[in-house]
Image (tube, helix red, strand yellow):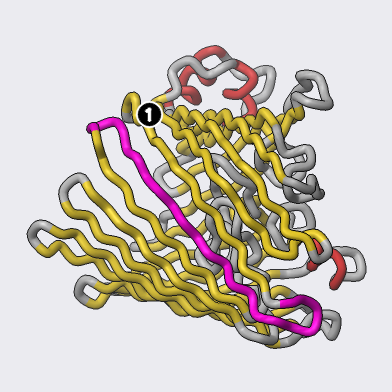
Amino acid sequence: MKKFAKMSLVAAVAVAGLTTTSSAKALEEAIKNVDVSGTVVYRYDDQNYDYQTADRGKDASNNKYKIGLTLKSQVNDDVTAVTRFIIGSDKDAGFVGLDYVNGEDAQAQITLSNVYFSYTGLKNTTINFGKQGLTTPWTVAIDADGNEQNGTGILALTNVGPVTLAAAYFNQNNLDESGDLKGTLKAIGTNGVGDNSIWTAGIMGNIGPVALDGWYLDLEDIFDSYTLGANAKFDLDTVKLSLGIRHSEVDFENKIMKTDNSLTKIEAAAKMGIFGAKLAYGWTDDEGGIGALDNDAKTGMNAWNLNLNGVEDATFLKTSIDAQVMPSLNLALNYNILDKDKTSTRSEEKDTELYLQASYQMSKNFGGYIRFGEVELEDAVGSKDNDGTVGRLQVQYSF
């Protein structure tokens, strides 16, 4: 983080909690204690499918924007005030999509997504209380180019030797509006789940090169869940190798949903010289495949256009090879297969995607990528296949 020396008067007053009667000297001192970080992202998506459905191609050719701005103000030696502003969607703190085909160049919304205090007065301990990101393996608390899940409550982290313990309680959340299960949760909860409490606890530690974690979460009257994960990194002279495995269980208390859901995934990656390769394989339970509240969360598994989270009785294979052809340029080829077994509501289906990606990092804080590929969805519209070509341009500035 770096000092925000040119922050506007309005932002300074909001962060520091100053009144209109504050002296010029007090305002100057407040600005000195404020750090700023954030991201600015522009994305252009283009999708062209044989059958333009609600989630495939229809209204998907958009200009998309998101700015995330996090401000930290040192209150005293033990307390820091933290705020996060989003310029984008006011519903899920994600992109605002401006449809250039059917709409004019509209304006984005400005929202305050986080406002909390962080206390570090206890040795090896951090306690955050207030409106903040849902920092759990099932959710995404902060995302430069996606939606974010947040809530109001308290989160505590403490280090005990080689182990980190975490515990949190939230009495409100935005899961009715943010996350890929929002439709499901709205259907289960009588008035949604925004006022349902969330309890979570976790333990993290390392044994040699292996990082281990275990978490439990309870969403009041909806479900309880646990996840176990392990990741290891090895430096074998000319080859850098990483391995990971995670298993997640979600058990619904409501009769509307199937009780037993699970998602398991195994991942491996290798880097040798300028070349790299990644392989991941996942599967879900034949009773239910929900593992995460957001597809981008640690307990989920997704690619670009294909996703395993929430798909029952299915397997997912992700493959990728890449080459760092220049210090600033990386070229990658990705091929993914989602295999869905026959169930009472669908026939056996196989969906695939193949795409190329060129990533360019102009400087440490500015870069982006271009993607182009094809997607084949089996029996996606009635008994008809739905195939399409997809493209994306994304540019990101970080500060």
Classify residue 263 as left or right of residue 165. right
Frontmost residue, 313 versus 255: 313
Quarter of the rendering containing residue 378: bottom right
Classify residue 293 as left or right of residue 395. right
**Amino acid type at mark 1:** Asn
Residue 27 colored in magenta in the image? no
Q: Is 117 above or below relative to 382?
A: above
Please tell me which residue is depicted at 41% across the width and 74% down the height of the picture. Answer: 266
Quarter of the rendering containing residue 140: bottom right
Residue 340 colored in magenta in the image? yes
* Span colored in magenta: 326-347
Q: Can residue 193 be seen in this view?
A: no
Q: Name the residue under label 1.
A: 365
Farthest-out residue, right: 190
Q: Is 257 above or below relative to 235?
A: below
Frontmost residue, 142 versus 374: 374
